[in-house]
Image (cartoon, rainbow, N blue to C red):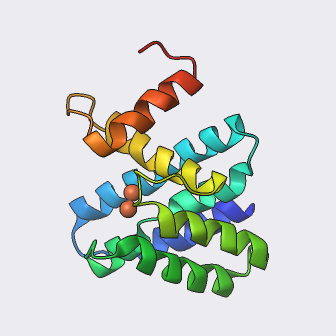
Amino acid sequence: MGRLKELKKYVNKKLSEMKDPDEMLKAAGHLYGVSMSAELIAQKRGLDTELAGMAGMLHDLYAYESGSYEDHAHKGADLARKVLEKLGLTSSEETDIICSAIYHHDDKAAVDAPMDEVLKDADAMHHIYNDLSKEVKEKEAARYADLKKEFGIEA
Ligand SMILES: [Fe+2]
Ligand SMILES: [Fe+2]
């Protein structure tokens, strides 16, 4: 089994412990959606597709486990590090890349390291594509416009 799948097995188990089945499905949809979007964006940018997918799977796990979005990006990076160190799937450099992406993913207005940007864009992408009838959030509009340009989609 590949390590992305291995990580999904771990995340699935954690999600299955959530009390509310609707929230659990929403959480799974978001983590899987962001993970796959991150893989596509990473591939387009010549970055490590698998690490991008792994960052996507872990990026909001803290919020779902704790039920709180308070400082969830920073706390989520700490949780991701614990999970990755426990699972032993990544080198310490890879763990740092994933945790940095999670740490920065809520700073949508700033530009950070390449993998950080992949996760931010993937997160924005899932928020937007999850419900096309909703107005695009202001903080995600510029990212969405740039993404469409990058993928050759007409505005
Ligand atoms: Fe988040
Ligand atoms: Fe998210």
Quarter of the figure that contains the C terminus: top left
Q: Residue placed at 52% from the left, 52% from the top?
A: 111
Q: Quadrant of residue 141?
A: top left
Q: Residue placed at 32% from the left, 45% from the top?
A: 139
Task: Specify whether 42 is left or right of 124.
Answer: right
Task: Specify whether 122 is left or right of 100.
Answer: left
Query: Where is 150 relative to 101, above or below?
Result: above
Residue that sits furthest to the front in the current view: 110
Percent of width and height locating residue 35: 54, 51
Q: Nearer the viewer, residue 38 or 87?
A: 38
Q: Quadrant of residue 36?
A: top right
Quarter of the figure that contains the N terminus: bottom right
Q: How many numbered tags mark residues here?
A: 0
Asked whether the viewer can see residue 16, the reply is no
Query: Where is 44 relative to 115, above or below?
Result: above
Residue that sits furthest to the top in the current view: 154
Query: Where is 55 relative to 88, above or below?
Result: above
Q: Quadrant of ligand 2?
A: bottom left
Task: Specify whether 128 is left or right of 80.
Answer: left
Asked whether the viewer can see residue 129, the reply is yes
Query: Where is 100 relative to 32, above or below?
Result: below
Percent of width and height locating residue 22: 22, 59
Percent of width and height locating residue 23: 25, 62
Task: Specify whether 68 is left or right of 89.
Answer: left
Q: Nearer the viewer, residue 6 or 148?
A: 148
Q: Residue placed at 48% from the left, 51% from the top?
A: 120
Q: Residue placed at 20% from the left, 28% from the top?
A: 133
Percent of width and height locating residue 144: 42, 33
